[in-house]
């Protein structure tokens, strides 16, 4: 059943020496029940399998149903993990997965987006029973934004803001993999195309730089004055999205915020505009407006064509995280760094981090530098 998958997994594992080293350095985890809310693609399998080999009990949920690879989940369940996740699961099933993960009584959390922590704190406010969590990890900017709006009942360690994650994954890999996926999906290049990048955080910076490297005419739309100034200093034309939307050939959202591209923007776009999202949340684009007001077809896999009046807009991966829904995401060698740091972070939250006061902390340098 897993013949092709196992060959691909073996190839990925071969090129992940840092991850192997980090897993080998972990302590015995036989008293740890780790609930993971994360992308469940092939590159995540070496970490989960390694944690299982150290005695860890694992419950798998996903931070994004469109990025789940069902063969990965099946393989990891066969290896001993518990899971409630599958590709394109419904909103109701996805929400239920958070409840199932918490009912499993985890001792620790490893998250991308803070869904489990958010649900747990909602249950606390509703006077519902909750598990006793020792500590947790959070890997995304959108998750950190959610955590900043609450008072965590246990220590949570932020590793999204580590230099190695910001500088490698956020700044370089997302943009590179997004445009590689664009080429593979559309069979087009960016030559002669005006690309508007929405958001100039580290992900947006990488998306803009990679687009230029691949021949695009890049513009940046950014509301934050400091980031907009940085974009100008980096040489990008900074534009008002309300005006730029009508001139763009490709629009890429990279904010992690909700409702960035709204119905007015969609109405103003010209025929043939491509729209894609590389932020963590799938609601950066007003997809319901298109579904309710436009005829839909799929001329190519992951290319969703919406006939809106006299024009057609191409929404890639239906607004979900494009580089990981339609593509492979980070390269294996780059993700090796990510997984090694994650493994080191798990080692920290089950040891030193477990004694920290409740609150949100940056993962200490001593906890992760050895993984490099």
Image (cartoon, helix red, strand yellow):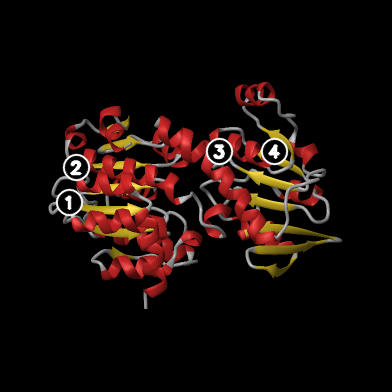
Position of residue 157 relative to residue 304, above or below, is above
User: Distance between the Cα atoms at labels 1 and 2?
Assistant: 8 Å
Q: Earlier in the sequence, mark 3 or mark 1?
A: 1
Q: Are marks 4 and 3 in contact (CB under 8 Å)?
A: no
* Residue ID for mark 3: 203
Q: Position of residue 12 (x, y in %)?
A: 39, 57
Mark 1, secondary structure of its residue: loop
Q: Are marks 1 and 2 in contact (CB under 8 Å)?
A: yes
Task: Give the camera-side residue of 327 and 36.
Answer: 327
User: Distance between the Cα atoms at labels 1 and 4?
Assistant: 46 Å
Q: Earlier in the sequence, mark 4 or mark 3?
A: 3
Binning the other alpha carbons within 10 Å of mark 4 as few (below 14), some (14 to 19) or many (20 upward) gives some
Position of residue 230 relative to residue 300, above or below, is above
Q: Earlier in the sequence, mark 2 or mark 4?
A: 4
Task: Give the image quarter of residue 22.
Answer: top left
* Residue ID for mark 4: 212
Q: Earlier in the sequence, mark 1 or mark 2?
A: 1
User: Distance between the Cα atoms at labels 4 and 3?
Assistant: 14 Å
Q: Position of residue 236 (x, y in %)?
A: 71, 29
Q: Quadrant of the N terminus?
A: bottom left
- Drawn side of residue 307 relative to residue 337, left or right: right
Task: Give the camera-side residue of 350 and 261.
Answer: 350
User: Distance between the Cα atoms at labels 2 and 3?
Assistant: 30 Å
């Amino acid at each position: 059943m897993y013949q092709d998958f196992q060959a691909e997994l073996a190839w990925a594992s071969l090129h992940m020496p840092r991850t192997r080293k980090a897993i080998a350095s972990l302590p015995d985890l036989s008293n740890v029940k780790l609930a993971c809310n994360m992308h469940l693609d092939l590159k995540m399998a070496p970490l989960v399998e390694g944690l299982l080999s150290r005695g860890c009990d694992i419950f798998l949920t996903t931070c994004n149903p469109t990025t789940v690879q069902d063969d990965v989940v099946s393989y990891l369940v066969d290896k001993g993990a518990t899971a409630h996740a599958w590709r394109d699961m419904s909103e109701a099933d996805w929400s239920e997965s958070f409840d199932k993960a918490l009912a499993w009584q985890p001792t620790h959390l490893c998250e991308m987006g803070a869904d489990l922590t958010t649900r747990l704190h909602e249950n606390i406010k509703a006077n519902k029973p909750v598990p006793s969590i020792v500590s947790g990890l959070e890997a995304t900017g959108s998750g950190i934004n959610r955590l900043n709006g609450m008072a965590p009942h246990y220590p949570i360690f932020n590793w999204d803001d580590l230099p190695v994650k910001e500088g490698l994954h956020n700044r370089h890999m997302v943009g590179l993999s997004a445009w590689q996926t664009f080429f593979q999906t559309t069979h087009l290049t960016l030559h002669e195309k005006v690309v508007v990048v929405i958001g100039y955080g580290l992900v947006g910076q990488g998306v803009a730089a990679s687009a230029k490297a691949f021949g695009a005419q890049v513009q940046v739309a950014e509301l934050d004055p400091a980031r907009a100034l940085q974009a100008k200093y980096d040489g990008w034309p900074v534009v008002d999205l309300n005006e730029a939307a009508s001139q763009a050939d490709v629009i890429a959202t990279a904010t992690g915020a909700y409702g960035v591209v709204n119905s007015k923007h969609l109405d103003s776009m010209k025929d043939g505009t491509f729209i894609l999202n590389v932020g963590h949340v799938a609601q950066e684009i007003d997809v319901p407006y298109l579904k309710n007001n436009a005829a839909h077809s799929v001329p190519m896999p992951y290319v969703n064509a919406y006939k809106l009046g006299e024009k057609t807009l191409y929404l890639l991966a239906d607004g979900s995280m494009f580089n990981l829904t339609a593509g492979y995401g980070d390269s294996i060698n780059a993700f090796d760094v990510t997984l090694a740091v994650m493994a080191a972070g798990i080692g920290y939250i089950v040891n030193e981090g477990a004694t920290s006061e409740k609150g949100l902390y940056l993962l200490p340098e001593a906890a992760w530098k050895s993984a490099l």
